Amino acid sequence: MELLTRARQWPQTGRARRAGVSSFGISGTNAHVILEHEPVESVQAPVESTQVPAGSAQVRLAAGELPWVVSGRSEGAVRAQAARLAAFVAGDGGGAGALDVGGVGLALVSSRSVFDHSAVVGGGSLDELLAGVGGVARGDGTAGGVVFERRVAGGVGVAFSGQGSQRPGMGRELYGRFPVFAGALDEVCAEVEKQAGLELLGVVFGDDAGVLEGTGVAQPALFAVEVALYRLAESFGV
Protein backbone atom coordinates (compact mmCIF):
# COMPACT_ATOMS: atom_id res chain seq x y z
CA MET A 1 0.00 0.00 0.00
CA GLU A 2 1.32 3.46 -0.85
CA LEU A 3 0.12 7.05 -1.04
CA LEU A 4 -0.59 8.27 -4.56
CA THR A 5 0.75 11.79 -5.13
CA ARG A 6 0.38 12.06 -8.92
CA ALA A 7 -1.57 10.50 -11.80
CA ARG A 8 -0.09 7.30 -13.17
CA GLN A 9 -1.03 4.09 -14.96
CA TRP A 10 -3.03 1.49 -13.07
CA PRO A 11 -1.33 -1.73 -14.19
CA GLN A 12 -2.91 -5.16 -14.41
CA THR A 13 -1.25 -7.55 -11.96
CA GLY A 14 -3.57 -10.52 -12.20
CA ARG A 15 -5.45 -9.45 -9.08
CA ALA A 16 -8.39 -7.12 -8.56
CA ARG A 17 -7.20 -3.50 -8.74
CA ARG A 18 -8.35 -1.47 -5.75
CA ALA A 19 -7.65 2.07 -4.56
CA GLY A 20 -8.76 4.11 -1.56
CA VAL A 21 -10.01 7.69 -1.78
CA SER A 22 -10.19 9.75 1.40
CA SER A 23 -11.89 13.08 2.04
CA PHE A 24 -11.37 15.08 5.21
CA GLY A 25 -13.72 18.04 5.60
CA ILE A 26 -12.89 21.12 7.65
CA SER A 27 -16.16 20.65 9.54
CA GLY A 28 -15.14 17.20 10.71
CA THR A 29 -16.87 15.09 8.08
CA ASN A 30 -14.52 12.29 7.06
CA ALA A 31 -15.16 9.77 4.31
CA HIS A 32 -13.22 6.89 2.79
CA VAL A 33 -14.23 5.00 -0.35
CA ILE A 34 -12.59 1.87 -1.74
CA LEU A 35 -12.73 1.73 -5.55
CA GLU A 36 -12.33 -1.42 -7.62
CA HIS A 37 -11.90 -1.73 -11.37
CA GLU A 38 -15.02 -2.53 -13.38
CA PRO A 39 -15.56 -6.28 -13.77
CA VAL A 40 -15.21 -7.69 -17.25
CA GLU A 41 -18.56 -8.89 -18.53
CA SER A 42 -18.86 -11.95 -20.73
CA VAL A 43 -20.01 -11.22 -24.27
CA GLN A 44 -22.57 -14.03 -24.03
CA ALA A 45 -24.28 -14.67 -20.72
CA PRO A 46 -24.69 -18.41 -20.05
CA VAL A 47 -28.23 -19.65 -20.48
CA GLU A 48 -28.00 -21.51 -17.20
CA SER A 49 -27.56 -18.24 -15.29
CA THR A 50 -29.69 -18.11 -12.12
CA GLN A 51 -29.63 -14.35 -11.79
CA VAL A 52 -32.95 -12.56 -11.33
CA PRO A 53 -33.66 -8.85 -12.01
CA ALA A 54 -32.06 -6.18 -9.83
CA GLY A 55 -34.09 -5.43 -6.73
CA SER A 56 -35.56 -8.93 -6.53
CA ALA A 57 -35.44 -11.21 -3.52
CA GLN A 58 -32.60 -13.73 -3.37
CA VAL A 59 -33.72 -17.20 -4.40
CA ARG A 60 -31.66 -20.28 -3.59
CA LEU A 61 -31.78 -22.91 -6.33
CA ALA A 62 -30.47 -26.43 -6.13
CA ALA A 63 -27.82 -27.63 -8.56
CA GLY A 64 -29.36 -28.09 -11.99
CA GLU A 65 -32.39 -25.92 -11.27
CA LEU A 66 -33.34 -22.92 -13.39
CA PRO A 67 -35.55 -19.94 -12.50
CA TRP A 68 -38.61 -18.71 -14.34
CA VAL A 69 -39.61 -15.20 -13.26
CA VAL A 70 -43.15 -13.90 -13.74
CA SER A 71 -43.89 -10.25 -12.97
CA GLY A 72 -46.92 -7.96 -12.86
CA ARG A 73 -48.33 -4.78 -11.36
CA SER A 74 -50.39 -6.75 -8.83
CA GLU A 75 -50.64 -10.29 -7.48
CA GLY A 76 -53.61 -10.85 -9.78
CA ALA A 77 -51.56 -9.72 -12.77
CA VAL A 78 -48.78 -12.14 -11.78
CA ARG A 79 -51.26 -15.03 -11.63
CA ALA A 80 -52.72 -14.07 -15.02
CA GLN A 81 -49.26 -13.84 -16.55
CA ALA A 82 -48.36 -17.24 -15.10
CA ALA A 83 -51.50 -18.75 -16.62
CA ARG A 84 -50.61 -17.31 -20.03
CA LEU A 85 -47.06 -18.65 -19.73
CA ALA A 86 -48.30 -22.12 -18.81
CA ALA A 87 -50.71 -22.14 -21.74
CA PHE A 88 -47.99 -20.99 -24.13
CA VAL A 89 -45.53 -23.62 -22.98
CA ALA A 90 -48.08 -26.43 -23.02
CA GLY A 91 -49.61 -25.48 -26.35
CA ASP A 92 -48.62 -22.57 -28.54
CA GLY A 93 -44.96 -22.86 -27.56
CA GLY A 94 -44.45 -25.53 -30.17
CA GLY A 95 -44.93 -28.48 -27.87
CA ALA A 96 -43.44 -29.13 -24.47
CA GLY A 97 -40.58 -31.19 -25.81
CA ALA A 98 -39.54 -28.52 -28.30
CA LEU A 99 -38.92 -25.80 -25.72
CA ASP A 100 -35.55 -24.88 -24.22
CA VAL A 101 -36.35 -24.25 -20.55
CA GLY A 102 -33.15 -22.25 -20.13
CA GLY A 103 -34.03 -20.07 -23.09
CA VAL A 104 -37.49 -19.44 -21.68
CA GLY A 105 -35.99 -18.43 -18.33
CA LEU A 106 -33.51 -16.10 -19.98
CA ALA A 107 -36.24 -14.48 -22.10
CA LEU A 108 -38.41 -13.91 -19.03
CA VAL A 109 -35.70 -11.87 -17.26
CA SER A 110 -34.13 -10.14 -20.26
CA SER A 111 -37.01 -9.26 -22.56
CA ARG A 112 -39.88 -8.46 -20.19
CA SER A 113 -40.47 -5.56 -17.79
CA VAL A 114 -40.11 -6.08 -14.03
CA PHE A 115 -43.02 -4.72 -11.98
CA ASP A 116 -43.77 -4.40 -8.26
CA HIS A 117 -44.94 -8.00 -7.83
CA SER A 118 -43.01 -11.05 -8.96
CA ALA A 119 -42.99 -14.81 -8.53
CA VAL A 120 -39.92 -16.97 -9.07
CA VAL A 121 -40.34 -20.65 -9.91
CA GLY A 122 -37.34 -22.95 -9.71
CA GLY A 123 -37.16 -26.37 -11.31
CA GLY A 124 -34.82 -28.89 -12.82
CA SER A 125 -37.16 -29.98 -15.59
CA LEU A 126 -39.97 -28.64 -17.73
CA ASP A 127 -42.52 -30.60 -15.70
CA GLU A 128 -41.28 -29.08 -12.42
CA LEU A 129 -41.29 -25.58 -13.85
CA LEU A 130 -44.78 -26.02 -15.29
CA ALA A 131 -46.01 -27.31 -11.94
CA GLY A 132 -44.62 -24.22 -10.22
CA VAL A 133 -46.07 -21.86 -12.82
CA GLY A 134 -49.40 -23.59 -12.41
CA GLY A 135 -49.20 -23.02 -8.67
CA VAL A 136 -48.62 -19.32 -9.25
CA ALA A 137 -51.57 -19.16 -11.64
CA ARG A 138 -53.79 -20.75 -8.97
CA GLY A 139 -52.52 -18.35 -6.31
CA ASP A 140 -50.85 -21.18 -4.41
CA GLY A 141 -48.05 -19.41 -2.55
CA THR A 142 -46.96 -22.71 -1.00
CA ALA A 143 -46.18 -24.40 -4.31
CA GLY A 144 -42.68 -25.83 -4.36
CA GLY A 145 -39.99 -23.45 -5.53
CA VAL A 146 -42.27 -20.40 -5.62
CA VAL A 147 -41.21 -17.12 -4.01
CA PHE A 148 -43.56 -14.15 -4.10
CA GLU A 149 -42.05 -10.70 -3.81
CA ARG A 150 -43.38 -7.18 -3.58
CA ARG A 151 -40.86 -4.45 -4.30
CA VAL A 152 -41.15 -1.57 -1.83
CA ALA A 153 -39.75 1.83 -2.69
CA GLY A 154 -36.84 2.69 -0.43
CA GLY A 155 -36.98 5.66 1.88
CA VAL A 156 -34.50 8.47 2.34
CA GLY A 157 -32.45 8.64 5.52
CA VAL A 158 -31.08 12.00 6.65
CA ALA A 159 -28.41 12.36 9.31
CA PHE A 160 -27.75 15.60 11.19
CA SER A 161 -24.23 15.53 12.58
CA GLY A 162 -24.25 18.75 14.60
CA GLN A 163 -20.99 19.62 12.86
CA GLY A 164 -20.14 22.82 11.01
CA SER A 165 -19.44 26.48 11.66
CA GLN A 166 -21.67 28.22 14.17
CA ARG A 167 -22.33 31.91 14.80
CA PRO A 168 -24.56 33.89 17.15
CA GLY A 169 -27.97 34.59 15.66
CA MET A 170 -27.79 31.86 13.03
CA GLY A 171 -31.25 31.23 11.61
CA ARG A 172 -32.81 34.31 13.23
CA GLU A 173 -34.11 35.74 9.95
CA LEU A 174 -35.51 32.38 8.85
CA TYR A 175 -37.13 31.95 12.25
CA GLY A 176 -38.97 35.24 11.86
CA ARG A 177 -40.06 34.64 8.28
CA PHE A 178 -40.94 30.94 7.98
CA PRO A 179 -43.29 29.31 10.51
CA VAL A 180 -42.11 25.85 9.42
CA PHE A 181 -38.53 26.71 10.34
CA ALA A 182 -39.61 28.31 13.62
CA GLY A 183 -41.80 25.37 14.59
CA ALA A 184 -39.07 22.82 13.92
CA LEU A 185 -36.46 24.84 15.81
CA ASP A 186 -38.80 25.33 18.78
CA GLU A 187 -39.54 21.61 18.88
CA VAL A 188 -35.88 20.57 18.93
CA CYS A 189 -34.92 23.27 21.44
CA ALA A 190 -37.74 22.20 23.75
CA GLU A 191 -36.55 18.59 23.64
CA VAL A 192 -32.93 19.60 24.28
CA GLU A 193 -34.04 21.65 27.28
CA LYS A 194 -36.08 18.71 28.54
CA GLN A 195 -33.26 16.20 28.15
CA ALA A 196 -30.19 18.31 28.95
CA GLY A 197 -31.52 21.33 30.82
CA LEU A 198 -30.05 23.68 28.20
CA GLU A 199 -32.09 26.71 27.13
CA LEU A 200 -30.87 26.47 23.56
CA LEU A 201 -32.96 29.05 21.70
CA GLY A 202 -31.64 31.92 23.79
CA VAL A 203 -28.09 30.76 23.20
CA VAL A 204 -28.56 30.44 19.43
CA PHE A 205 -30.14 33.87 19.09
CA GLY A 206 -27.88 35.50 21.67
CA ASP A 207 -24.91 37.76 21.02
CA ASP A 208 -22.29 35.91 23.08
CA ALA A 209 -20.06 34.07 20.61
CA GLY A 210 -18.04 32.58 23.44
CA VAL A 211 -20.98 30.54 24.70
CA LEU A 212 -21.33 28.86 21.31
CA GLU A 213 -17.69 27.81 21.23
CA GLY A 214 -18.17 25.00 23.71
CA THR A 215 -18.85 21.59 22.16
CA GLY A 216 -21.67 20.91 24.61
CA VAL A 217 -23.55 23.92 23.24
CA ALA A 218 -22.31 24.23 19.66
CA GLN A 219 -23.24 20.72 18.57
CA PRO A 220 -26.85 20.67 19.83
CA ALA A 221 -27.29 24.22 18.48
CA LEU A 222 -26.08 23.19 15.04
CA PHE A 223 -28.20 20.06 15.18
CA ALA A 224 -31.30 22.12 15.94
CA VAL A 225 -30.64 24.53 13.08
CA GLU A 226 -29.90 21.65 10.69
CA VAL A 227 -33.22 19.98 11.50
CA ALA A 228 -35.08 23.26 11.03
CA LEU A 229 -33.35 23.87 7.69
CA TYR A 230 -34.30 20.38 6.55
CA ARG A 231 -37.94 20.89 7.50
CA LEU A 232 -37.93 24.20 5.64
CA ALA A 233 -36.48 22.62 2.49
CA GLU A 234 -38.97 19.77 2.84
CA SER A 235 -41.85 22.27 2.93
CA PHE A 236 -40.63 23.65 -0.40
CA GLY A 237 -40.97 20.19 -1.94
CA VAL A 238 -37.26 19.45 -2.02
Image (cartoon, helix red, strand yellow):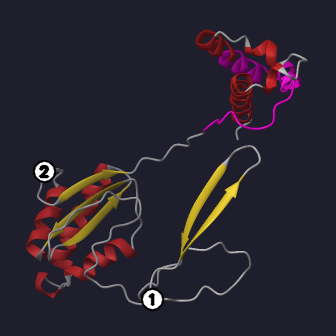
98 sits to left or right of 148:
left
Q: Secondary structure at mark 2?
A: loop
- Count neighbours of disc 1 (C-alpha within 10 A) and say few if under 14, some if 14 to 19, many if 20 or more: few
Determine whether 225 is above or below 52 in the image. above
Residue 162, position as x, y percentages in the image? 68, 33
The one of 177 and 85 positioned closer to us in this rendering: 177
Q: Residue type at mark 2: give it.
A: Thr
In this rendering, the answer to whether 91 lies above or below 233 is below
- In the picture shown, does residue 167 fall above or below 130? above
Residue identifier under label 1: 14
Q: Secondary structure at mark 1?
A: loop
User: As drawn, is 236 to the left or to the right of 121?
Assistant: right
Q: Quadrant of residue 126?
A: bottom left
Q: Which of the two marks, 2 or 1, is nearer to us in this view?
A: 1
Q: Nearer the viewer, residue 174 or 235?
A: 174
- Mark 1 is on which residue type? Gly
Look at the image and give the residue range highlighted in magenta: 159-188
- Which image quadrant: the N terminus? bottom right
Residue denoted by label 2: 142
Q: Position of residue 19 (x, y in %)?
A: 57, 72
- Viewer-side residue, 74 vs 122: 122
Outermost front residue: 2
Q: How many marks?
A: 2
Residue 89 belongs to magenta span? no
- Residue at x 38% of width, y 89% of height: 44
Q: Residue at x 65, y 11 (%)?
A: 193
